[in-house]
Image: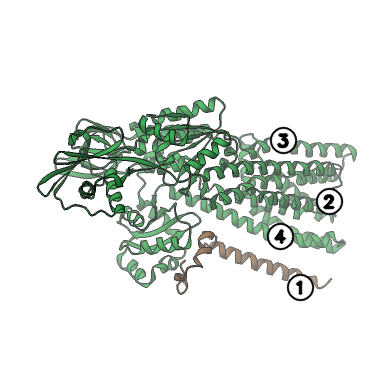
Chain colours: A brown, B green
Amino acid sequence: MDVLVYLIPASLILGGLGLAAFFWALKSDQFDDPAGDSRRILSDEFDENPKG
Amino acid sequence: MAPNSASASSFTSADMGIAETPTGAACPGCVALPAGNSALSKALAEGPVRKVHLSLPSIHCAACISGVENGLMQLDTVHAARVNLTRKRAEVTIDQDAEVEPLLDHLIGYGFQAFALDGATLQASDADRAARDLLMRLGVAGFAMMNVMLLSVAVWSGASDATRDLFHWISAAIAIPTIAFSSQPFFKSAFMALKVARLNMDVPISLAILLAAGMSIYETSASGHHAYFDAALSLTFFLLAGRYLDQKTRSTARSAAAELAAMEVPYALRLDAEGHTRVPIGEVVVGDTLLVRAGANIPVDGTVLKGASELDRALLTGETDPVAITEGGTVTAGEVNLTGPLEIRADAVGEDTVLHSLASLVSIAEASKSRYNSLADRAAKIYAPVVHLLSLCAFIAWMYISGGDVRLALGIATATLIITCPCALGLAVPAVSTVASGRLFRKGLLIKHETALERLAEVDTVVFDKTGTLTEGRPLLDAPEAIPATAFSVAMALAEGSSHPLAAAIAQAGRARGIAPADLTDIVEKPGFGIAANWGGKPVRLGRATWVGAEPVPATASYLDIDGAITPFTFSDRLRTGARELLDALRNDGFQIQLLSGDTRPAVEAIAKELGIATWQADMLPLEKANRVNALRDEGRRVLMVGDGLNDTAALAGAHVSLAPASALDAARVAADMVLVSPDLSHTLDAIRIGRSAKRRILENFGMAATYNMISIPIAVMGFASPLAAALAMSTSSILVSLNALRAR
């Protein structure tokens, strides 16, 4: 069961990375306009210089 | 609403700019980027800017986004524009001293209807913060739940002794901070309820979470077998998910009364010895002389001192035809001055104006509506006491059976509380309303009020307004092909320069028929009467019957006089798309239908006959409409009110549930529970159908939650419940309820 010493911290760190990514996405307004973002990718205007 | 109305209407955009800056400052680069480099330098060069928010009810696609953004960017005062499609809004950065109105006019030119959002903006961003806060807590709870669940799986599959204790301790280390952070909304709400000695759904939730965590810590420290950390966390997670969906669907709902006040014109032109000065509406006192330009709104109730014009009362009364007004006539706040400038004496200001009394009618009606008990509230009322009593009974019974073993009795009482806890109940309503609102959104209907769908399911009577609801609200020229081409071309030339709706209709019909306007000289508009000119030496006039000396015809009409030869132009209003289909379908389904209009009798009768509406009434005042709706309610009828004007707002707010088309006035859209964005009125029928289906799904969900409780409660009370059973039961019931919600269509 010694392997737990590595595996438990590893699983917690990986989960924590996911959580940190979620916080980052939330803080940078990526959940503000899901409907708009899903359509903006259809427009070729924003390719070089993405808006927001 | 009286005390805050003044602050709402005089809320300046400059204040808003200051308050809004911090959000933008979080990422200044992002805000300036869309404008490209030129805009960036423009912003730096010209100094102070402010942010304004526009409401764009008609945008729906990728082309709309770039259309609005690029359209706005063409204006010199605009530094940046960003459309939010989810909320159908645009955030625009403009010069500090620039006006908002040009933006709106500019967008209309591109075919996008836009409205300035004023005092409501701050409230809306509060709602955003609340949603984001919930999402953050939900994310943390989700992360913690998954990790603890993994550890629990190890325990359930046979970890023992030191390993089990270690896993329990790690679970505790993850769970306790998470509960302290993520469950705060429940604790706060439960505390508020207990403070006023009431029970709400959050009391048993908070108790279950706290007891589960506390007992698990005790068990862990005593090397016990059962720890409920995973149950406490999944409870938090599922309930937060429900709470978040709920918040999302209701964030658009705002107080109708506040926006009705914000809609009032904020400035008036006061005339004094030196000319006119622009003063805030709050500073106008009774007896002041005010100038109202053509095209402007009447700021206060008053009497005309000088000038003649025509007033568009459609928004206030539902009348299609503009009303002529001369010296001595009375005007009402909210009317639109069409053709000539007017000098008016203020007779009633602020809270005494007719517009304001409408606002108070709306707030009274809103208060009566908030007494509606949602299905979720009713379920909570039965549920909360039952759960508490059950676990208390379990505790007392096991204390007696075991001869005073507190640990065992508390363990069983906690298990009962956790197992019965309303995971499924918390998701039952929000999951269904999210799915149903999503479906309706795709059909062009916005649900603004959280219980609107439930109330819609109960409707048995539909009351319509005429102008702007069943009809387009714009006059169209009757039989343009029957009018002689010469007369038409003269009329068209006369009409082209005027902003009068009938003149605009003539000009439009002429263009459609491909007629070239005649060559006229000396065109003069006589406000309140018509337009006169000279056509190759002959005097020509287009205007009212009495002015041109014509024999009036029994319809909305304008008369052309070419040197004594009279040609009448008659107009009628066109039915809105889908109106006929909707009325036929409603009749087939056995709804009682009524038409209440402020327009004149012949106009209403014609529409009622055309659509086959038996019960109709014309010449109704706003209060009479509201009273009629209230009378129907007192008869026990559930009324769906469909209307668009200011005169409908009180009736909209008073009806069991209400719908306003997107073309409606702000105030009506805000007072209504639902907004129809699609121009096709027949989608109202879809709304009723989906509302009924949603209510069925909600009841099914409650039934499912109840069945599940009926099975699990005896097991828990008898002491057979384990953390594994609790976790299984909680997840399966939540998933079942969510799946059932998907069937709302």
Q: Name the residue tied to disc 3.
A: B385
Three-letter amino acid code of the residue under disc 1: Tyr
Discs 2 and 1 lie in a common subunit: no
Give me the disc on residue B722.
Answer: 2
Three-letter amino acid code of the residue under disc 3: Pro
Three-letter amino acid code of the residue under disc 4: Ile
Q: Is residue B288 visible?
A: no
* Quarter where residue B599 is shown: top left
Seen as rendered, the residue at the extreme left is B537
The span from disc 2 to disc 1 (Cα, nearest Å) is 30 Å
Discs 1 and 4 lie in a common subunit: no
Q: Nearer the viewer, residue B121 or B171?
A: B121
Q: Name the residue tied to disc 1.
A: A6
Above or below: residue B558 compared with residue A39: above
* Callout 1: chain: A
Q: Nearer the viewer, mark 3 or mark 1?
A: 3
Q: Nearer the viewer, mark 2 or mark 1?
A: 2
Above or below: residue B36 compared with residue B484: below
* Callout 4: chain: B
Three-letter amino acid code of the residue under disc 2: Ser
Give me the disc on residue B174.
Answer: 4
Q: Quadrant of the N terminus of chain B?
A: top left
